[in-house]
Image: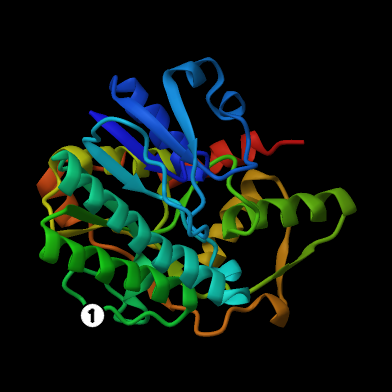
Amino acid sequence: MRVFVTGADGFVGRRLVRALLAERHDVIAGCRPGGPAPQDWLGADAKLVRCLPLELADRAPLDLGAGPLDALVHLAAVSSGSDARNDPLTAWEINVVGTVRLLEAITVRRRSGGENPRVLLVSSGEVYGPGPSSPRRETDPVEPVAPYGATKAAAELAALESWRRTGLQVIIARSFPHIGPGQSPRFVVPDFVERLKQAKREGRRTVPTGNLEPVRDFLDVYDVAAAYLALLERGAAGQVYNVARGSGISVRELFDRLARLLEVEAVPSPDPALVRNADIPHLVGDPAKLERATGWRPTITLDETLRGIVDAEAD
């Protein structure tokens, strides 16, 4: 396949590009101008990938490269919930308007060139909002309670409308939290690791935290990349699939596991400044639909992922 990946130089995008190359697919990487050079995140494999500048907030025509595309994976987004809360206008501009511009660009190419690419739109489990303490299914109501989830829900609507109106082969992946080495400290696991390491260096036993009660469903980023590749190959157009492990862990237990791995005797200290408004108490996804459609299952345990993060972040 010839695959265009938006946000290719991001946390998930880098893993997905490597997974596509391993399967001998032809990859075009859409990267934000001013970001890291392809050699920095692909090494010797950079010569196998064509990188094009892609800025979804720019109203200039989008360059998706010459020649027909077999598939496109749309990862580029304001992906941090805190960033979206701090600047919701930018989040809506990039996550929703940018997605609509991308869909329209693909539709125009399809009409003029005859290509009919599969389009995988990466969404989020946060679109479900608060709900029961049981794994969410794709048929559950979509009731986001924060700007990030709301923008992802709107992007889903736009993509499915495009599928119904134009026949564009849109597939939606509702991804639950995913983690791994190299993730930004704006996300909970690398933030905990940094705070615990700092407490260890300073000889402190207390670590400031936000709300530790929520339960979340965490996947390794490599398993997520494998799920996206499986959906490109075997997902059905017009369908939504949860990308999840199917089991949850409280944020408090996550903190405790990381403290043990870092060998830090730490006690969390609630800090009101770190508490999110309208936090979703329980957010776990049911992956059964994805498993039935593609045969995908996670292969990396949470403990293995946490150990890998701690080892990668060792001083």
- Pinpoint residue 112: horizontal percent, then vertical percent: 18, 44
**Which residue is at the far front?**
112
Q: Indicate the quadrant where residue 313 lies.
A: top right
Residue drawn where x is 43% and y is 78% of the image: 281
Query: Dot 1, crowdedness within 10 Å: few (<14), some or many (≥20)?
Result: few
Instruction: Check the image and report above or below for 96 versus 59.
Output: below
Q: Quadrant of the C terminus?
A: top right
SS state under label 1: loop
- Where in the figure is residue 205, as x and y percent of width and height? 80, 62
Hey, what amino acid is under mark 1?
Pro
The residue under label 1 is 141
Between 269 and 15, the one lying in front of the other is 15
- With respect to residue 111, does 14 lie above or below? above
Q: Residue at x 14, y 56 (%)?
A: 289
Give the tally of numbered discs. 1
- The x, y position of residue 252, in whole percent, is 56, 66
Q: Position of residue 163 (x, y in %)?
A: 15, 61
Question: In the rendered image, which quarter is residue 272 located in?
Answer: bottom right
